[in-house]
Image (cartoon, coloured by chain):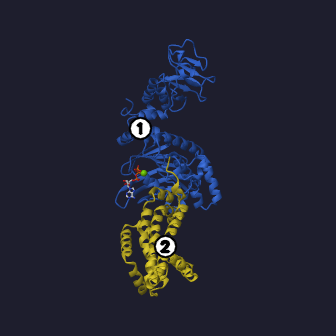
Chain colours: A yellow, B blue
């Protein structure tokens, strides 16, 4: 078994393919993470300001997240007029999932920013937009980061599902392996997917730590 | 100067937080808004920097309606110290203090230099600048809050219960510091508190608010304590206000007495049968030698009891009472401006002097609610 895997991996043709899939997978999961986050932040901000909007947006987000991913992959091209296997299709679908997943953490994070800190910022002469980026958003990072980590893992696994309809990524190794009843690519695909999720998670933890040096200092003494 | 002209604030839910407020705050003074919770102090304060807009009437700063100014620009010219300090937890102390200069477009370097100066001004070591707010004590955080509000040198300073979150000892220190700073800076300060003691201590004028946003009385502290405008004010100012008034009367009317004294290091042998005040070579009080004490205790320093607080001539009479009550001999030690022994007073004598003052017409106050 191990021998098979080594043999499979030592073939330069396979190596190229694996690296290609890995790159694809990274792109297909990372891009939606960034786009989804960028969409969730203004949506969450709106939701945190108006009660009626909050209920609507949170409700919509919950519904969107329950749509089966495969269904979204299949339906979306019909809506936006792309090829079913086009990467844009997967990217868009996952961006929507990410945004839906992150709206709540954004709202929770913004709610958790102490009111007196916001009042102080206003009193210092911040205009609302600048205050949002200078005060509210940085203070939201710890809560938000937890949501982004979940979204990252979720995206990486959903990209594998996309392989079922031929969108590429490491999932192509499973589907390819199944078709020819050959185990090594399947195992390599699973291992690399897990590894990718793990490395991304570590990077996100590192990023959060770099962005929030203030959150690690001891409490008041 | 800050003027409230027939200002009313009615919130959307119908709450009238401020009701037809007419009041003017003199430039270069500390004016205190005091009153029970929910009486509209914060709302009044926030109408000055447009964090709340009046429903009726107008607020003027230096003769100009604040509504004529862009809110953000207006606020950069009005320092604001918020309850609980409201420091930015994600910024270092130095960057917190540099906030308004940076917003006003100063270079980072100049803003940081200025912030360093301000830390010094409020009595904080500049090394603290590198820390985050969570790494400071409550009192230090409040100082940073004051430094941040002063950073762009605004002519007006609004302070909303700036010291209410710290313990009483630290609070006293911060109040003293504020008065010292104000003597130096000469800002127009509006200071909100619900603590009447704090109000009469820091305020040159005090506005007492009543529930529903009514101004009950606006007067100098002594006047307020001596002649409360109505039952509400007299109740709020409190039953012990006779004691508070001590803060404003000096003890010049009190006759000082003499007490046996001895030099440090040369105590009388045998020890006398009465309290002896021990002075050092410069006539500064060091402590009390109890009556008939013996030399058995070993050293002279063990024998001499630390004296209570000292009362400096010409300072508020409250200090004289404190000195008498805190002294082991029951005799309050009075010193001159240089800290040299001048005489002693008893608590009874201080109280008697107060009674006399009260009888005098210019300090006349109704008998209810005084010492008793
Ligand atoms: N945004 C608001 N909407 C509705 N009512 C408000 C609002 N802000 C304050 N109030 C009400 O207005 C009144 C005055 O509030 P304000 O905060 O000015 O009181 P305060 O004197 O500062 O009290 P405290 O000593 O508790 O800080 C209160 O009854 C309060 O509930
Ligand atoms: Mg208040």
Position of residue B298 measured from the top left corner of the image (x, y, whole percent): 55, 18
Position of residue B259 measured from the top left corner of the image (x, y, whole percent): 53, 18
> Measured along the vertical axis of the image, is residue B234 above or below residue A57?
above
Q: CA distance from mark 1 to mark 2?
A: 84 Å
Residue B19 seen in the figure? yes
> Is label 1 on the same chain as label 2?
no
Residue A46 seen in the figure? no
Q: Secondary structure at mark 2?
A: helix
Residue B227's tag is 1
**Residue at (38, 70) in percent of width and height:** A58
Position of residue B105 measured from the top left corner of the image (x, y, whole percent): 61, 62
Q: Chain of mark 2?
A: A
Q: Quadrant of residue B361?
A: top left
Question: What residue did someone put label 2 on?
Answer: A191
> Tag 1: Cα neighbours inside 10 Å, few (<14), some, or many (≥20)?
some
> Measured along the vertical axis of the image, is residue B9 above or below residue B230?
below
Position of residue A99 measured from the top left corner of the image (x, y, whole percent): 44, 73
**Residue at (50, 70) in percent of width and height:** A195
């Amino acid at each position: 078994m191990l021998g098979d895997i080594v043999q499979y991996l030592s073939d330069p043709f396979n190596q190229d393919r694996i690296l290609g899939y890995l790159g694809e997978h990274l792109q297909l999961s990372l891009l939606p993470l960034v786009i989804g986050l960028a969409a969730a932040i203004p949506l969450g901000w709106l939701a945190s300001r108006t009660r009626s909007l909050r209920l609507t947006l949170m409700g919509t987000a919950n519904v969107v997240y329950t749509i089966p991913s495969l269904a979204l992959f299949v339906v979306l091209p019909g809506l936006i007029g792309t090829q079913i296997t086009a990467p844009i299709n997967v990217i868009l679908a996952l961006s929507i999932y990410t945004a839906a997943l992150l709206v709540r953490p954004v709202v929770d994070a913004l709610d958790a920013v102490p009111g007196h800190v916001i009042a102080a910022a206003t009193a210092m002469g911040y205009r609302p937009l600048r205050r949002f980026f200078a005060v509210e958003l940085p203070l939201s990072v710890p809560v938000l980061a937890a949501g982004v980590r979940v979204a990252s893992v979720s995206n990486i696994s959903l990209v594998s599902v996309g392989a079922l309809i031929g969108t590429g990524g490491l999932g192509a190794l499973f589907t390819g392996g199944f078709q020819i009843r050959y185990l090594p690519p399947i195992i390599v695909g699973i291992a690399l997917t897990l590894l990718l999720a793990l490395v991304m998670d570590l990077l996100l933890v590192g990023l959060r730590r770099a962005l929030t040096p203030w959150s690690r200092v001891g409490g008041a003494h | 100067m800050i003027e409230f002209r027939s200002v009313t604030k009615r919130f959307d839910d119908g709450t009238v937080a401020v009701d037809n407020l007419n009041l003017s705050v003199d430039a270069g003074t500390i004016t205190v808004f005091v009153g029970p919770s929910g009486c509209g102090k914060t709302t009044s304060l926030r109408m000055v920097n447009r964090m709340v807009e009046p429903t009726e009437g107008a607020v003027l700063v230096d003769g100009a309606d604040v509504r004529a100014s862009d809110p953000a620009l207006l606020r950069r010219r009005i320092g604001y110290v918020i309850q609980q300090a409201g420091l930015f937890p994600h910024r270092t102390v130095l960057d917190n203090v540099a906030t308004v200069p940076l917003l006003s477009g100063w270079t980072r370097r100049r803003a940081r230099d200025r912030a360093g100066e301000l830390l010094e001004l409020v009595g904080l070591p500049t090394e603290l600048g590198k820390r985050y707010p969570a790494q400071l004590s409550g009192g230090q955080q409040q100082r940073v809050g004051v430094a941040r509000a002063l950073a762009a040198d605004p002519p007006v300073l609004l302070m909303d219960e700036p010291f209410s979150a710290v313990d009483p000892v630290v609070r006293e220190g911060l109040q003293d510091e504020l008065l010292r700073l104000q003597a130096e800076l000469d800002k127009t300060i509006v200071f909100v508190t619900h603590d009447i003691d704090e109000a009469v201590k820091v305020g040159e004028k005090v506005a007492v608010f009543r529930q529903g946003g009514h101004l009950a009385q606006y007067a100098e502290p002594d006047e307020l304590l001596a002649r409360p405008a109505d039952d509400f004010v007299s109740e709020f100012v409190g039953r012990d206000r006779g004691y508070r008034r001590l803060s404003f009367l000096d003890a010049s009317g009190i006759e000082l007495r003499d007490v046996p004294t001895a030099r440090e290091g040369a105590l009388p042998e045998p020890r006398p049968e009465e309290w002896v005040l021990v002075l050092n070579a410069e006539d500064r009080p060091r402590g009390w030698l109890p009556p008939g004490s013996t030399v058995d205790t070993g050293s002279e320093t063990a024998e001499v009891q630390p004296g209570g607080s000292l009362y400096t001539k010409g300072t508020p009479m409250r200090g004289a009472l404190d000195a008498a009550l805190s002294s082991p001999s029951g005799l309050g030690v009075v010193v001159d401006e240089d800290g040299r022994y001048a005489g002693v007073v008893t608590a009874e004598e201080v109280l008697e002097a107060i009674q006399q003052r009260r009888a005098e017409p210019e300090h006349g106050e109704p008998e209810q609610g005084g010492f008793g």
